[in-house]
Image: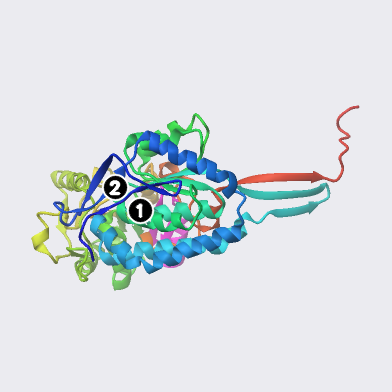
Amino acid sequence: MTTEPIVIKAIINGEKIETARTLPRENPTHPDTIVGYAPVNTKEETQRAIDAAYEAFKTWKWSDVDDRIARMERAIQKIKDSTDEIAEFLSREHGKALYDAKGEIAVSIMWMEFACNHVKNVVTPEVKEHENGKTIITFDPIGVVSAITPWNYPISLSTIKIAPALLTGNTMVLKPSPFAPLAVSKVCEIVADEFPPGVLNLVHGEADVGVELTSNEKIAKIAFTGGTKTAKSIIKAASETIKKMTLELGGNDAAIVLEDFDVNDEKALRRMVISNFLTAGQICMIAKRVYVHRSIYEQFVEKYIEAANKWIRVGDPFNPEVTVGPVNNKNQVKYVKSLVEDAKNKGCKVIPLGQIVNPELMDNGYFLQPTLVLGADYHDPIVVEEQFGPTVPIMPFDDEEQVIALHNESIYGLTSSVWGEEEHAVNVARRIEAGTTMINTAAIQGLDVRFPFGGVKQSGVGREYGEDGIKSYTETHVINIPKNLELPYIPE
């Protein structure tokens, strides 16, 4: 593994572009160490990238779908061959444990392969013969897609956009987060090399780049994963030209534990712990608040702590014993600490969880020991706000009506989970307001790329994954061929 800083370049019309400024990305485990440098593109360079994608679309939209699939499959194989190198970059710049980084790449590949295998199902025209003639329905590419992706799962949340966009005949300009720009840029380079110049462009930068990517009149669709507050600004910027949008936003996902949940099921409790603390809790679809039926609350908490102390091992992401690495950046550390401190000030009990494997790192890196918060009020900030870090409140509830109301009063509705006897859990799940509800599992453990994923309410617009996610990068075009051209209801 090389520890020398790497320098990432922008990709515009197939060329790697030098920029006047670069931005360093530190290692969250050792913040005084620079992992690499990402470019800071200007508004003008972003316009060049958009123009390149716009020109490339004029021919790419007519490309054969088999050619698109073959190109993407070559890129997938190169990503597979480079998994170890890419995962090391991701762990160093992000802070997630090495097994977690490899898992993210595996999910990305799984989705890209699904998209390759199913894109023909989506774009093949439908021909309908009927008594009034014939109708042909085609699913055409939209145009230039701007993709803006976050730092928590930078590769998977980029490939979830890249694969369906390019396979359906669109072109793209992608902007990653400055908090994890390196590994995803390596993946973008691999993909861009397999496609004609201008089909996939990569830019980095600050607010002016984001504004251009969401307001430029040549952008036909925006694909964004990130915070709800930022999404509101994007919607305003896009309104002038009425762009298509897929927005996967924040969540405050709840886990509901019913009275018939088996508190002695060690595997289920381990799944719960992982759903709270994987990637140091920095996942949009992670379980961020847990409601447990009062009749089993005390037993559940006891068994939960046992399971957490077995699974959670905090330290260097490259230590094979470690399951939880540092938080990605110091601003997130500060925010999570403020929520936990507020809970303490309100009289909550805060219980440290897990083992510290590398204590020598804790004071210098962006580390937080995972914590369990007990005694929180249903409307305390630790409960109603998205922590996006390694802490979770567990609260008792008395009946299903109460817990369903507590779940559904949130402005968010990304994912949720219900834990208990299957039929009972499904009946409760049907009353939950969320894009996805999982039974007896949660978060990535219950993710299935074959089916659509997205949120309700302020957790998003549209769906990714599944054939619905591929189709979201197409326009439906109806061609009517009427048999009877006479219109008797119009007077001569």
Q: CA distance from mark 1 to mark 2?
A: 9 Å
Q: Is residue 258 left or right of residue 335?
A: right
Amino acid beneath label 2: Ala
Q: Secondary structure at mark 2?
A: strand
Q: At which x and y percent is residue 474? A: 58, 48
Give coordinates of residue 422: x percent, y percent. 44, 67
Magenta highlight on residue 430: yes
The residue that disc 1 covers is: 185
Q: Amino acid at mark 1?
A: Ser
* Dot 1 and dot 2 residues touching (CB under 8 Å): yes
Q: Which residue is mark 2?
A: 38
Question: Could one spot residue 449 in this view of the protein?
Answer: no
* Above or below for 336 versus 271: above
In what quadrant of the picture does the C terminus appear?
top right
Q: Seen in the image, is 409 located left or right of residue 312?
A: right
Could you classify mark 1 by the number of other residues whose Cα lies within 10 Å: few (under 14), some (14-19), or many (20 or more)? many
